[in-house]
Image (cartoon, rainbow, N blue to C red):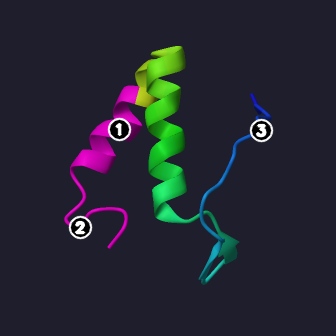
Amino acid sequence: MVELIAEFLYHAPVSSAFGPVLHPDDVAAGRTAALDGQAEVRDAIDNDGLLRLDTPASA
């Protein structure tokens, strides 16, 4: 299933080997908001992954 959503982004895209991608802070904010709004298991897994990162998203 594909979900289309509108999000307000606060940072410009960053470059990657795959082309422009969302800034890590915007990804973290979106995943946290999804957990609060939907409370799906996948959202909890995403947030667990964010918490296990060695560096903060804004670094």
* Residue ID for mark 3: 6
* 18 with respect to 1 (left or right): left
Is 27 rendered above or below residue 7? below
Please provide percent x and percent y for residue 1: 74, 28
* Residue ID for mark 2: 55
For image coordinates 61% across by 58% down, the residue present is: 10
- Contact check, label 2 and label 3, Cβ < 8 Å: no
Disc 2 to disc 3, how far (Cα)?
27 Å
For image coordinates 54% across by 54% down, the residue present is: 26
Disc 1 to disc 2, how far (Cα)?
14 Å
Q: Which mark is residue 47?
A: 1
How many residues crowd mark 1 within 10 Å: few (<14), some (14–19), many (20+)?
A: some
**What amino acid does circle 2 point to?**
Thr
Foreground pick, 42 / 28: 28
* 55 with respect to 33 (left or right): left
**What amino acid does circle 3 point to?**
Ala
Question: In the structure shown, which secondary structural element does the residue marked by tag 1 occupy?
Answer: helix
